[in-house]
Each structure stands twice: as structure tokens, then as C-alpha cells.
Amino acid sequence: MQTLGIRFPDLLLWSPLIAGLLCFILRSEKNSKALALISSLLTLAIAGISLSYAGNSKTDLQLSGLVDKYEWMQSIGGSFNIGLDGMGRLLTLLTAFSFPVIFIATYNGKYKQPAAFYGLMLLSQAGLMGVFTALDALTFYFFWELALIPVYFLCSYWGGEKRIQATFKFFVYTFTGSLLMLVGIIYMYLHTSGEFSKAGVLLHEHTFSLDAFRHINLTPTEQGWLFWLFFIAFAIKMPVFPFHTWQPDTYEQSPTAVTMVLSGIMVKMGVFAVLRWVLPVFSVAATHNSMIIIGLAVFGMIYASLIAIKQDDLKRLVAYSSIAHIGLMCATMFASASPAAPAGVTGIQGVMIQMFSHGINIIGLWIVVDLLEKQTGTRKISQLGGVAHKAPVLTIMLVVIAFANIALPLTNAFVGEFMMFNGLFGFNKWYAAIAGISIILAAVYTLNMVQKVFYGETNAVTENVKEIAWNEKIILGVIVLVIFIVGVFPQPILNLTKDMGLVITGQAK
């Protein structure tokens, strides 16, 4: 199906990028806030329309306006190559959906220098869109950094009292990971074959193309150390144990809107990058190291869940909960990547669905935490109680989101977790059994939080809590609606991700 010249990847990048730059020259808080919201809604419309074009082959994507390639640093073989396959469309949809939700949910928030705040938020959205559409390693690296740099400034300027320490740790971790990845990219680039024109003329000696990276003949030793360069960079971003220690502090000290971006979308950069760059390119090394990584991921799930149970701060509880969920995704990716995996495609599809579902659910939890903190002035579970008596609508919304967080049937997370455990069980029953303990632990800390914060008697802290505003009801209602739609009818997402599951597991024809 042709698109009359519409280029969706370009539009997804330029819409937030231009709006973000315009925000910096607007002095009015009202105007910058309105521009950010309008731009994010436009981006959501573009991402939604792109879903109507089927197919994941190169021909299908080009005819549908879902792939673009421009000359960029031609002398060294760098091209601005972006495209939207099934996984890319799913994650750009998550990104496009999340930003207007965040802007509306925090619409009444006050920020110093609001124009700069909203400008940086939109630049981070543009960077995320670039990461999820990049089909060239140089383009991917450029947008990887573009997504992270605005977040660094957002955390360090608008964060809490300990923001400098938390942001410094975040910077050290992510910068180290980026350098490791850059070394790997340069080595891979120098081992690619030249690209020729149709007339047989050598255009450049090497290339950064993803396709070229997939066809490099590497020795097992080369695959081994290159695999770890890329994986560590992406493991830091997810994060998985033992690269997770930056996350709780950064989430706690960041403005809630920024925390929503970090946990709802940016952690998916690492999961996406493993699926896009690590598993297809370093398949031998991934299989060889799978037991180590799955073991670390499963241990991290239990470890993070046990720490979450002991938390009294709502932000830190949600942060450790996120680490546990990402650990399951990481374990399933490496259990399902081999062509010999009994349920490989199912497991990989489960990861892709769970990336989308986790993003929706975790943003919903952050919105509730933010609403409680604004009204009570505290995030301490021990100081709260009886909120259900004062805000029944908020309580109903939170209970649904909490059930989704523990993957109750008919919610979106159930679909992804069921498919992931299917893939993990087919790989190793013991790993699946140990990972399954995290489901019980998730129910413990989630339901314990709901009971202590929302039920029981009100106290001096919660006595003056009021029902949430109309914009907050609408946003939480939309999140709850998406939770049930994906939980009851996940087939559109399954159709979207099936071909990518075959590619990643090496089963595509």
C-alpha cells in the first residue's frame, strides 16, 4: 500500500524535534506547555496511522513509506537510514502514546524555566524515536546519545535535593556503556565490506548498515568480546543486575514526568537494542553466554522483588518493581534467541508485547504516586492510609493498574508474561520455576502497598486528600482502557511482532 509520499519515520522524528527547539524560544509557560502537548498529540496520530500499513519485508516497508535512507557522511559509509518494522512501530507507538499522557497528567505542574523543561522533554522524545527507527549503527548511536543528554539536564536541574549525586552516577554508568558500544561499532565497521553502486562503482570501503553488520564473518573469540561490549552498554540502560544501582536513586530524585520517561520508555531502549543489534549480529556468542545472563537476570528478579517488599518509599518500590520486570524480559530474550529454542518465537513476541504493556502500566503507577505526593507531601507508605475514603476513583484506577502490574488475567501484562514464561520454560524448567517466584513476590509488595496506602483509616496526612481532577481521571481512564483492550484482544500486536520474532530467532526464510 503506497502512502502518497508520506514518510512516517521522518515525521516521527521531526515533529518532536522542531517543537522542542521552538519551545526554547517561547517565554510563556502556557505557550510552551501547549506546544508540547499539541506536538505530542500530532506524533501520536502519525504513529497510529503508521500501524495501518502491513508487512515487514523491505519491499513492503519501502512501498508503505516506512523506510527512508539519506546520504550522511558518505565518505565513511554513514547513511541516515531509518525505518519502521513491526517492533519499531510498536515502540514508537508506545513513545508517542506516553508523552501526551505524561504532559496531560502533569499539566498543572509548575517548573522553573518551563520552556527549557518542555523543550528538553521533546528532544528526548525525538531521540527515542530515532533509536527505535535506526537501521544504521551510526544513526543509532547518534540518537542513543540524543535521547540521554536531555534527560541528564532534566534530572540535574529539576530534580530533588540529592539530584547531583544521582545524576552523576547516572552519567557515569551511561557514558561508560556508550563508550563500550562505540568501540564495538567502530570495530564492526572496519570489518564490513564496501558498498557498490548499481554500475559497480565502489561508493565507500566500509559501512555502518545493520544488514552489513549481520553478515560479517567473525571468529568465536571476536564474537565473544564484541558481544560483551554491546550487551553491557544495553544492560546498563535496561537495567539488569548487577548494572542496576543507578536506577533507584535516579528515579527517586528526578521530576516525576522525567521518571515516567525513564521507566516507561527509556529502559526499553536497552531491551530493544538487544533484540535489534545483539541477538541477530552475535547469535553464537549470545547462545554461548545465555546461561550466565539468564542466571544474572533471574537472580536480579528475586533480588529486586525482595528489596521492593522492604521499601517504604513509593518511588523506590516502583523502581525495584521495574527492575524485576525487565529481568524477566532479559532472561526470556536469551532463552528464546536460539533457532533450536522450543518456544523461541513465542518468547520473543512475549518480550515485545511486554515492553509495550510494562510501559503503559509503569507510567500509570507513576501518575498515582505523583498525585499522592502532591496532595499529601509524602511518598512514605507508613505515613499514608485510607485514601480510598477520600478518592474512590483514584483507588479504582490504581487497583486495576496494580492488578496489571502483577499480570492478572484479562490485563495486558498477563499476555506478555504468559508468553515469556512459555519461552523460558521451554529453555530450562528450573530457571522458569525460580523466575516464577517473582510473580508471588510482586503480588506481595504490590497488594501490600495498595492495602496500606488506600485502605484502612485516614490519618492526619490523608485527611485532606481530594478526588483527582478531570484531566487526571481521563488519563488514568485511558490507561485502564488500554490495559483491558490489550489483555482481552492482543492479536493486533501479535500480528505486528510475528515476523520480527522469526528474524530475531533466525527462523525467517
Image (spheres, rainbow, N blue to C red):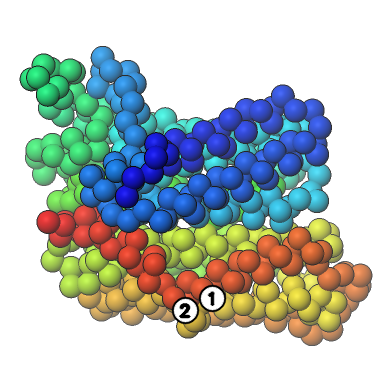
Between residues 235 and 258, which one lies in front from this camera angle?
Answer: 258
Which residue, given by chain and number where applicable, does mark 1 sit on? 484
Count neighbours of disc 1 (C-alpha within 10 A) and say few if under 14, some if 14 to 19, many if 20 or more. some
Q: Nearer the viewer, residue 234 or 32?
A: 32
Q: Is 368 located above or below residue 459 in the figure?
A: above
Circle 1: element type: helix
Evaluate whether residue 363 shows in this view. yes
At label 2, the amino acid type is Val
Which quadrant would residue 496 be assigned to in this image? Answer: bottom left
Q: Is residue 40 left or right of residue 461?
A: left
Residue at x 52%, y 59% (from the top left corner): 359
Q: Position of residue 406 (x, y in %)?
A: 52, 76
**Residue 88's x, y, as percent?**
38, 49
Contact between labelled residues 1 and 2, with CB atoms less than 8 Å apart:
yes
Residue with the mark numbered 2: 488
In the image, residue 355 above or below residue 216? below
Q: Residue at x 34, y 74 (%)?
A: 419
Please determine whether, in this image, residue 69 is positioned above or below residue 236: above
Point out residue 465 in the picture as x, y percentages from the top left corner: 87, 70
Which part of the image, by quadrant, shows the C terminus? bottom left
Relative placement, left or right, of 242 versus 474 is left
